[in-house]
Image (cartoon, rainbow, N blue to C red):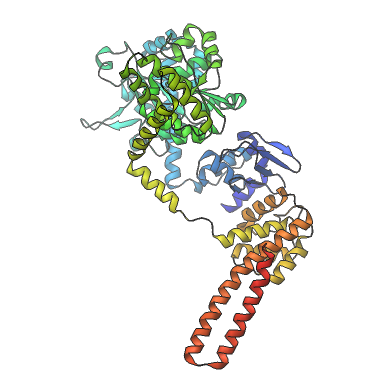
Amino acid sequence: MESQVEEIKKKLDIVDVINRMLPLKKRGRHFIACCPFHQEKTPSFTVSPEMQIFKCFGCSKGGDVFTFYQEFNRVDFREALEELAKIAGVKLKTNFDEGQNKNRKKILEINNEVAKFYHYMLMTHPLGTVAKKYVMDRGIKEETIKQFGVGFCPEQTSLIVNYLKKKGFSENEMIMTGTFGKSNYGNRLYDRFMGRLVFPLIDFRGQILGFSGRVLPGANPAVAGQMAKYINSPETEIYHKSQMVFGLNLAKDFIRKENAVIVVEGEFDMISPFAADIKNIVAVKGTAFTEEQLQLLRRYAETLILALDADFAGNHAAIRSIELAEKLDFDIKVVDLLGQFKDPDEAVRADPKWFKQRVTAAISIWDFIINSAVATFGVETIKGKKEILNMVLPFISRIKSEVIRSDYLHKLATMIGSDTESIKKEMERKDSNFKLQTSNREMIKTILIEKEPKQDRRDEMEERLMTLIMGAKNKVKVAKRVDENLKFATIKWQKIMELILRDKIDWEKPLNKVPEELKDIFGGTFLTAEAQDLEPIRRKREINKMMAKLITIDLKKEIIESAQKIGKYEREENQEELDRAEKENIAALFKLSKWQKLQK
């Protein structure tokens, strides 16, 4: 497998691969961008075409093309290998597909066939006539139906089961997809989407992970009234509801271009605007976002434009969603349909131009929440004002900026005829109560995060010293001077120091002679060194300071050890060893005094 990894690396340029997912700009010898792994306004994410690695100087993430693909797309190494092999045009060995990965591939294969079958039933088969009429009556053209792969699942499950069996799939494999179950009566397979209009749930890489089904009004009135209006695939090895964003595979490039994403609730609410040339739009299920969904969207845009149901501001789950979006530094706005339409689908079908205008006129989330609360409860009664505060304050309390939070407290106070200080006190009281209601799970999670140990202090300082060495004009000369005074304690830095001292590295192509296990750390440190522009005098001073700190740590240990020896030999009345230990202690104290001065 290792040889295939190297073959793929040789055929790919990390700049080209990353640029497909994250637009890069050339700066000198390297390429830069705002890091996709943490929020920042000034680019600190650097890609080196010479070393074929990336490094973020903000969050310290780094590695090769495989590392980036795994981190960015949230896939394991096997998936990254498969995807990058396709891009590189490398055929993987057949023995690679084993175990869980084999199941994953099988589910994807079946899902593709199921999607084809459903789509055929909708577009061509007589059983799909009612479903097709329903979709067309909603103003969805055939071209759009094909683009989204919309389909219909007939009630006769035997049709699709027989189709899949002819394709070579077993019943157990069909059940593994989550689309099929086994009846308690007769032990026969059933399709959970039977009698429904079906939307393939496609991830941002274009893979069909599952399906969403909608009951068709009039398709079978006797059955339709007994079924949930919408259902999704259950959780499987490849489908996780918390990570799914409908339509992102088609919209992501438009979202990136606009630097804004419009979010709606249902499939039709996304499909209708998309067909009307509003392309930077996606759908989620319900009004509550998950952290995974928001992180995914944050890769493509800074502005989050919500076009959800008008009553979402009163939904407690929305409080958590807005809080998460705030933490990710989204500029959050809301499309107000002014009560004229119940959802974006209806608005677009009636007047696409008007809906586009409402998107352009989207207002701040905080303005929308206050306006909605006032319109819903009114300010004429004490009870109305109370309800407004109950609805609005949990949101305002989570505004990160104190200035903006203060502005909205003032606005709220003005609208309900109160003073800002009273509103602020009420918010603090409610916020305190809300915090007390935090779930045990969240509390445990917070405690675990707080207790997570930080990077070893010595390793951190050695990394800084190595960065200073690599940034020097004469790296070997500086490394020798450091080596005369200090020995690195961490094995990885010992090995890298040895490479530099042997003067075998070609600094124009620095990774060529570096062992595979050291390439990531070596390359990342070298990129960090190149990014720092230090004057030679300042660099020398910084090196001396860092050496002094590390030597001081060693000397303090030495002093403690020699003091323990002195105590031991005094008790044993061993004068010869006592004299030697006292000399060691005095010498170490003298050196400590010298090196402590260099730290200042």
Residue 48, x across and y down, in percent: 69, 45
Work out whether residue 452 or residue 574 is closer to the camera in this orientation and state it.
574
Residue 131, x across and y down, in percent: 38, 13
Q: Quadrant of residue 112?
A: top left
Q: Quadrant of residue 458?
A: bottom right
> Total label count?
0
The relative height of residue 121 versus residue 59 in the rendered view (above or below) is: above
Residue 345, x across and y down, in percent: 45, 13
Q: Left or right: where does residue 405 sit relative to residue 505?
A: left
Work out whether residue 63 or residue 305 is closer to the camera in this orientation and state it.
305
Q: Is residue 232 visible?
A: no
Q: Left or right: where does residue 382 sit relative to residue 96?
A: left
The relative height of residue 180 versus residue 85 in the rendered view (above or below) is: above
Residue occupying image coordinates x 60% and y 23%:
258
Work out whether residue 405 or residue 425 is closer to the camera in this orientation and state it.
425
Q: Is residue 441 visible?
A: yes
Q: Quadrant of residue 154?
A: top left
